[in-house]
Image (spheres, rainbow, N blue to C red):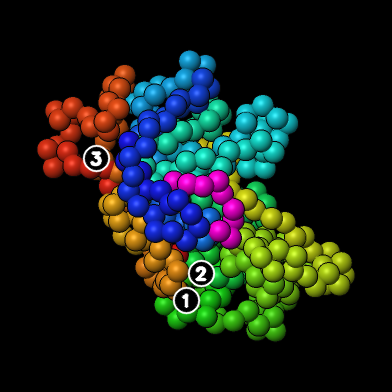
């Protein structure tokens, strides 16, 4: 199969021919229709987050099941699906309790094994990790959910318990931050978005932020909110932004750390005197388990949430390497999420039930318009 792969950290990712993936007995192979380009992929490519080499990046994807293992009961060839970027084992206590995102035996495409910048990708423990897509949700939208949007949704709903009329402070308006703005607004919160980029602030206002600021000045935030935000989320990942999130809270407020704290920031201090005196809650957010997807997809089906607003452009899989390397440069949040499509149209109707997608990635021409007979396109999302 064709895939984008890099042989070493920082080396140019190129299109290569790889052996077909082996389907685990309890897993599935998914023919990728769309995959997002995420800054987490860039961190792995640059070596900030070590991965086995060579590596095929990509962990936000949607597609069609092309093969299932003999132990899989709940899914079949032809099903339209997505999956969380964390594949839980499905057996441990954390998985059984619905918290696969912290499974100690987790797998992650693009990080622990080959990812979705490819024609096909493996999902382990398929009955546990695959998520069936409603007809109303196309592949491009589904690919935009995989990491940033799902992380923000889990952070605000499960971790922070965001409520209607709460003040929500969002620090950093990249992929996770703009997702948090959109979700917070949809859930009825009053959103303050912080970013030094004017274009990012403008985009946050378009997505529902009540106020936008160039910096998270605690005094300004307390003045706006009359005492501080009930919830804050750091979508950047630095000592300064994490601290700003805590200092912007009201008494008994909740701070969620969603931005990755890498390198020197991994052991960053926090204003613990404030945490103790004001009884603040500080929690992390790492993706979202498959168990939480139905609630999110229901909001998308009803139109309450539209992640498609965050998709900036759709490109071909052959352009995925260029898009990944472009993250070396500062990218305006206004550019939106980049999604790369593979094979047929990413918004195409589902493959008929029982139809096996051939190993060469093509499907019968009479199943779709001739214009869709080209390669699978890859949808890429920029931060």
Mark 1 sits on what residue?
A: 201
Q: Quadrant of the N terminus?
A: top left
Decide: marks 2, 1 in contact (CB < 8 A)?
yes
Residue 332 lies in the magenta stretch: no
In the image, residue 257 lies at what x, y percent?
66, 61
**In this orientation, which residue lies closer to the viewer: 343 or 43?**
43
Q: Quadrant of the C terminus?
A: bottom left
In the image, residue 98 lies at what x, y percent?
65, 35
Q: What mark, if any, has residue 344 been given in the picture? A: 3
Residue 49 lies in the magenta stretch: yes
**In this orientation, which residue lies closer to the viewer: 139 or 307?**
139
- Write the residue at 37% across / 30% down: 20
Q: Residues within 10 Å of mark 3 (few under 14, many from 20)?
A: many
Going from the N terminus, do you reach mark 2 or mark 3 first?
2
Judged left or right of residue 280, residue 216 is: left
In the image, residue 128 lies at what x, y percent?
56, 29
- Range drawn in magenta: 47-58
- Write the residue at 44% across / 26% down: 22
Judged left or right of residue 319, residue 134 is: right
Dot 3 lies on which element? loop
């Amino acid at each position: 199969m064709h895939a984008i792969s890099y042989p070493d950290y920082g080396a140019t990712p190129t299109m290569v021919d790889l052996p077909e993936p082996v389907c685990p007995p309890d897993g599935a192979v998914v023919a990728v229709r769309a995959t997002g380009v995420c800054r987490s992929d860039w961190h792995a490519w640059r070596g900030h987050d070590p991965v086995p080499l060579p590596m095929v990046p990509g962990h936000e994807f949607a597609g069609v099941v092309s093969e299932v293992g003999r132990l899989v009961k709940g899914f079949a060839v032809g099903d339209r699906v997505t999956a969380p970027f964390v594949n839980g084992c499905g057996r441990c206590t954390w998985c059984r309790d619905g918290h696969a995102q912290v499974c100690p035996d987790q797998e992650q495409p693009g990080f622990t094994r080959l990812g979705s910048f490819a024609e096909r990708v493996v999902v382990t423990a398929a009955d546990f990790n695959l998520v069936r897509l409603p007809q109303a949700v196309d592949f491009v939208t589904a690919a935009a959910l995989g990491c940033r949007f799902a992380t923000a949704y889990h952070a605000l709903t499960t971790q922070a318990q965001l409520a209607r009329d709460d003040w929500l402070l969002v620090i950093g308006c990249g992929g996770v931050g703009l997702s948090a703005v959109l979700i917070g607004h949809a859930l009825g919160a009053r959103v303050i978005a912080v970013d030094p980029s004017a274009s990012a602030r403008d985009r946050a206002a378009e997505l529902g932020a009540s106020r936008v600021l160039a910096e998270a000045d605690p005094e300004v935030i307390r003045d706006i909110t009359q005492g501080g935000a009930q919830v804050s989320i750091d979508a950047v990942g630095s000592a300064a932004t994490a601290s700003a999130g805590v200092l912007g809270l009201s008494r008994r407020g909740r701070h969620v750390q969603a931005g990755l704290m890498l390198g020197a920031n991994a052991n960053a201090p926090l204003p613990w005197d404030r945490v103790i005196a004001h009884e603040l809650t500080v929690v992390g957010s790492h993706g979202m388990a498959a168990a939480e997807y139905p609630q999110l997809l229901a909001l998308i089906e009803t139109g309450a949430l539209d992640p498609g607003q965050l998709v900036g452009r759709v490109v071909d899989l052959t352009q995925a390497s260029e898009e990944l390397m472009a993250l070396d440069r500062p990218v305006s949040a206004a550019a939106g999420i980049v999604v790369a499509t593979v094979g047929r149209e990413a918004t195409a109707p589902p493959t008929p039930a029982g139809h096996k997608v051939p190993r060469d990635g093509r499907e019968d021409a009479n199943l779709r318009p001739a214009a869709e007979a080209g390669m699978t396109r890859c949808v890429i999302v920029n931060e």
